[in-house]
Image (spheres, rainbow, N blue to C red):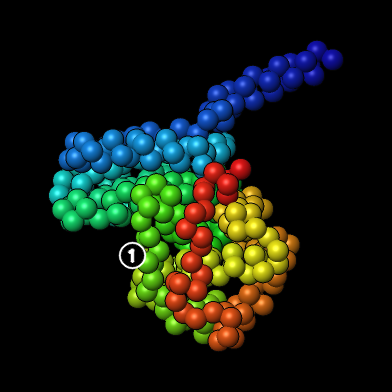
Amino acid sequence: MKKYFFYLVLFLSLSCNKDDDNVVPDKFKFNYNLHSSLPQDWIDEFNVIMGNLDKHIPVKPTSYFPELDIYAWKSSADKPYKKQIGNADGACICGNSKERYMVLEIPESEFTYKQMHRYSVIPHEVFHAYQMGLSENFFKPDGLELKWMAEGGAASFESLYIQQYYDFNYFYDAQANIDVAVTSTPEIYESYDSNGPKDQNYASSVFMVLALVKELQKQGVSEEKAFRMVYKDFWEKNADKNNWKTAFKELFNIEVNDFYNILKDGKSYNITITDVMPSSNLKLENIFL
Ligand SMILES: [Zn+2]
């Protein structure tokens, strides 16, 4: 009996120590590193956007992903966080299974020409953090890739955010250059190999996500719920690269290949953003209930 008690105490103390390292906070923590090269009005807007996003898509803290460092700077500052993140640049959630961080290198020209992307990049990258909180298999470097759902989701969310808060159509502005491959070989957009001219600003991936939303609406699902299914419910299923087609069918009530065949049939959709444009009065608070 004594022996068991000893082991029990040992077990409890070990598991307590383990918990200290692995504690899941009540709230996900973003750690801001906003470089002095950034204009104050961008920093002010960044804070407003982060507050709005925390209402719409609060990132779920988990043991594998309890917090995230954000490094933001103006491109002319030339990688001021080299010590922390090496040569990472552009915009991404970068890193590996051990450490992950968000990079927001804002090109100088976006300030000069007051381009919407200097703001829209924030909801885009935070949406990826949201996906990671919902799905460990999406978080894992060798987990689920599925680019058109991952990037088409983040990029269309970015445009819905801009539509709601700036009354500006970022779908037309930046995501209208859809490649004909969406109607010939949509399956190539499952992989990041399709990056580049075939998916400029993820326009083709956005088209596929918006077409899926239209297909769900044809099943009688409301537009808001259809977006919720694509943005949230799908990732909550935590599918991996082997079973995602099953998860897709269960949730959306359509086989992946049947969805691709609708894109390919040449009758259902023209290759234009107008054909799949969401309602202009859509509100994020009605998508993410
Ligand atoms: Zn992205």
Q: Secondary structure at mark 1?
A: helix
Residue in the image at 64% along x and 19% along y: 13
Q: Residue furthest right?
A: 1
In this rendering, is residue 239 above or below 261? above
- Give the side of residue 127 with respect to residue 218, left or right: left
Foreground residue among 35 and 4: 35
Residue 196 position, x and y percent, is: 35, 72
Kind of residue at disc 1: Asp
Q: Residue 187's spot in the image, x, y percent? A: 55, 76
What residue is rendered at 42% in x and 78% in y?
179
Disc 1 C-beta below 8 A from ligand 1: no
Mark 1 Cα within 10 Å, few/some/many (few <14, many 20+)?
few
Quadrant in which the C terminus appears: top right
Residue 182 relative to residue 46: left or right:
right
Horizontal side of residue 236 vs 187, given as left or right: right
The quadrant in which residue 133 appears is top right
Q: Nearer the viewer, residue 135 or 161?
A: 161
> Which x, y percent locates residue 218?
67, 69
**Residue under the image location 27 percent in, 37 percent down:** 43
**Farthest residue in the front direction?**
281
> Can you see residue 41?
yes
The residue beneath circle 1 is 173
Residue 181 location (% of width, % of height): 47, 81
Which residue is depicted at the point 70% across and 70% down? Answer: 254
- Residue 268: quarter of image: bottom right
